[in-house]
Image (cartoon, rainbow, N blue to C red):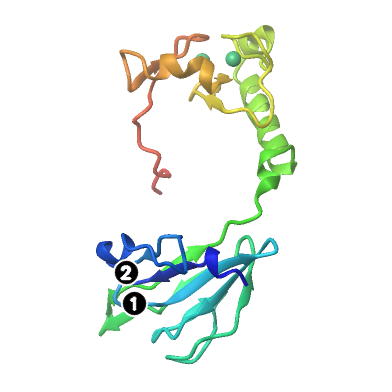
């Protein structure tokens, strides 16, 4: 256990958050919900593994739905891994209505794999290119795997921009056109299709 890398979580006010405790240089994380205790739980990392423990909260810390300790009791350390859900307290209901909501934290850690070639980004890349080629003969004729601005290939692990017309460029190549004087309207330099980039992204309602 390394006391110097503890992330304290609780119902901290803005004032508390600005006080750096001498035993922990990391600023506490505050949630305003009334179901969160003033000192609720702590996270820390030891030898590459993250842990959580409840620090005598009254409404409980839950790791993947399992409560870590009884009310007011400190729990032992529990390892947390990528994809785990840590919940602070439970929804407080007054009759039918939820008055105070619990806080759910989805853990993302050790995600170095996202930055290199993997099943997710290579298949996403294939989908983008297939999508593009389905768009018509023009795309295939001009070589859909190239950015029409810099003429270099578009490849996995690059930051890309996909227009609604399915044309794809490197984000840094197309950025000036995205943020141009007609923004939020964007005219595709390949096919002249005009898109409203502020358009709703809600799923269509049935
Ligand atoms: Zn480019
Ligand atoms: Zn286009």
User: On the image, numbered disc 2 is attached to which residue?
Assistant: 12
- Image quarter of the N terminus: bottom right
**Point 50% across, 87% down: residue:** 74
**Point 32% across, 63% down: residue:** 19
Query: Hey, which quadrant is residue 21 in on the image?
Result: bottom left
Query: Hey, which quadrant is residue 5 in on the image?
Result: bottom right
**Along the polypeptide, which appears first: circle 2 or circle 1?**
2
Nearest the viewer among 37 and 5 is: 5
User: On the image, numbered disc 1 is attached to which residue?
Assistant: 38
For the residue with label 1, is its CB less than 8 Å from the closest atom of ligand 1? no
**Point 45% across, 83% down: residue:** 60
How many labels, in total? 2
Q: CA distance from mark 2 to mark 1?
A: 6 Å
For the residue with label 2, is its CB less than 8 Å from the closest atom of ligand 1? no
Quadrant hosting ligand 1? top right
Q: Measured from the top left, where is residue 203 in percent x and y? A: 43, 44
Classify 166 as above or below 123. above
């Amino acid at each position: 256990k390394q006391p110097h890398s503890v992330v304290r979580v609780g119902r901290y006010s803005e004032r508390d958050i600005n006080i750096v405790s001498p035993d922990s240089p990391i600023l506490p994380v505050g949630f305003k919900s009334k179901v969160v205790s003033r000192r609720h739980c702590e996270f820390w990392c030891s030898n590459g593994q993250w842990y959580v423990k409840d620090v005598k909260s009254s409404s409980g810390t839950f790791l993947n739905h399992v409560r870590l300790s009884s009310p007011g009791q400190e729990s032992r350390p529990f390892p947390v891994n990528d994809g785990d859900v840590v919940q602070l307290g439970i929804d407080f209901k007054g009759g039918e209505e939820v008055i105070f909501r619990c806080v759910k934290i989805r853990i993302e850690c050790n995600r170095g794999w996202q930055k290199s070639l993997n099943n997710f980004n290579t298949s996403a890349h294939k989908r983008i290119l297939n999508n593009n080629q389905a768009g018509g003969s023009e795309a295939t004729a001009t070589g859909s795997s190239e950015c029409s601005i810099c003429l270099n290939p578009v490849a996995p692990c690059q930051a890309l921009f996909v227009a609604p017309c399915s044309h794809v460029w490197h984000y840094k190549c197309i950025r000036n056109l995205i943020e141009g004087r007609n923004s939020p309207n964007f005219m595709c330099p390949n096919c002249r299709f005009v898109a409203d980039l502020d358009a709703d992204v809600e799923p269509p309602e049935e």
